[in-house]
Image (spheres, grey):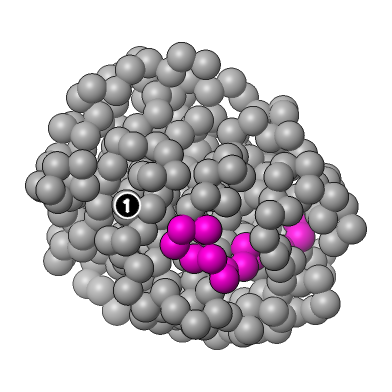
């Protein structure tokens, strides 16, 4: 387990700058090219070990959600890089367009995810994966189709989240791989069996820790056969689970990140938001801090899931090392 510098009074509502972080560095790649070509370019940097039967975990969204990664982009990307891959999802804990398999499959069609196989992993049942070193869980309940896959790409739309503060690779896997009825209840209600009043009773630091422990089960399961990409585009303070009810986007589009290190990619995504001008970052930063979402990062480090220090390499300029300030210096205010 990683050695962590404990700073009294600093929780999930306080941003920790790079100068206060300790430990070794990971590598994160960056491109400003938010397109299928940008996805292809970055995936080729981090695709080691993505072989065999490949799962691609992304957020397919509620019906007609305006901010999801466009399905046409993913179609082109997969056709080029992973033609035999399967998109994987699980049913939702909340009532909506995806809380049953039947409704979920209809929503997939509406949102354009019918160009390749989509495996709703908890359609037929659940299984458990061990959580090593957790304080909330010893195991996590996931869809029982997960063990069919040899490797996994977390292709994540980075954005805000009403409870988690932000949704990056950690949330995509922690919530998105937990099955809809048991695993998600363990995270949000704190137990498998719960009353209606307990359904959404877990908040702030505890919620972030439970999400990270759930993610750790999936990351540990795939080991060297997992990689991560975050798309920083159409970043509402709302998650894609809110569909057409999502808050308007006001944060500028930034680019795409890729890494073999889940903590590094989510930390770099957050750092890029904080590097924006105050007027451009205000809403998303407020959402992250008021929900104590930054605890996702510090707890992943405590669990030994990766590194919060990293080298940011500019794939648009021969992988030259840049700062987050360099990466966002030419972004323009969101145009709608």
* Horizontal and vertical percent position of residue 331: 29, 23
Q: Secondary structure at mark 1?
A: helix
How many numbered circles are shown? Answer: 1
Q: Is residue 83 left or right of residue 186?
A: left
Q: Is residue 222 left or right of residue 322?
A: right
* Horizontal and vertical percent position of residue 232: 41, 38
* Horizontal and vertical percent position of residue 189: 72, 60
Q: Residue 48 or 58: which is nearer the viewer? A: 48
Q: Is residue 318 left or right of residue 150?
A: left
Indicate whether 168 appears above or below 82.
above
Q: Is residue 132 magenta?
A: no
Q: Quadrant of the N terminus?
A: bottom left
Outermost residue toward the right?
102
Label 1, on which residue?
A: 41
Residue in view at x 52 percent, y 58 percent:
79
The reply to whether residue 214 is visible in this rendering is no
Q: Is residue 85 left or right of residue 22?
A: right
Residue in view at x 21 percent, y 41 percent:
316
**Which range is magenta?**
78-93
Residue in view at x 30 percent, y 36 percent:
32
Which of the 4 quarters of the picture holds residue 206?
bottom right
The reply to whether residue 32 is visible in this rendering is yes
């Amino acid at each position: 387990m990683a050695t962590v510098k404990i700073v009294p009074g600093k929780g999930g509502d306080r941003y920790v700058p790079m100068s206060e972080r300790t430990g070794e560095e990971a590598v994160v790649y960056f491109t400003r090219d938010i397109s299928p070509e940008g996805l292809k370019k970055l995936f080729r940097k981090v695709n080691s070990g993505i072989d065999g039967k490949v799962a691609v975990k992304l957020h397919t969204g509620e019906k007609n959600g305006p901010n999801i990664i466009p399905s046409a982009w993913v179609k082109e990307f997969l056709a080029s890089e992973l033609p035999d891959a399967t998109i994987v999802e699980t049913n939702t804990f909340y009532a909506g367009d995806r809380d049953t398999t039947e409704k979920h499959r209809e929503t997939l069609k509406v949102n354009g995810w019918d160009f390749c196989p989509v495996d709703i992993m908890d359609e037929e049942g659940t299984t458990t994966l061990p959580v090593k070193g957790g304080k909330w869980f010893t195991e996590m309940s996931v869809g029982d189709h997960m063990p069919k896959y040899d490797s996994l790409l977390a292709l994540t739309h980075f954005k805000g989240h009403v409870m988690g503060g932000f949704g990056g690779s950690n949330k995509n896997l922690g919530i998105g791989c937990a099955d809809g009825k048991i695993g998600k209840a363990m995270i949000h209600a704190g137990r498998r069996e719960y009353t209606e009043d307990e359904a959404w009773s877990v908040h702030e630091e505890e919620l972030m820790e439970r999400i990270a422990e759930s993610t750790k089960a999936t990351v540990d399961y795939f080991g060297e056969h997992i990689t991560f990409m975050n798309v920083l585009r159409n970043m509402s303070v709302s998650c894609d689970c809110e569909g057409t009810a999502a808050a308007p986007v006001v944060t500028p589009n930034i680019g795409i990140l890729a890494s073999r290190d889940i903590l590094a990619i989510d930390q770099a995504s957050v750092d890029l938001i904080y590097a924006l001008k105050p007027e451009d970052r205000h809403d998303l930063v407020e959402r992250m801090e008021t929900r104590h979402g930054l605890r996702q990062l510090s707890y992943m480090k405590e669990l030994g899931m990766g590194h919060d220090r990293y080298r940011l390499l500019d794939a648009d300029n021969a992988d030259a090392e840049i700062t987050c300030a360099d990466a966002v210096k030419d972004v323009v205010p969101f145009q709608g």
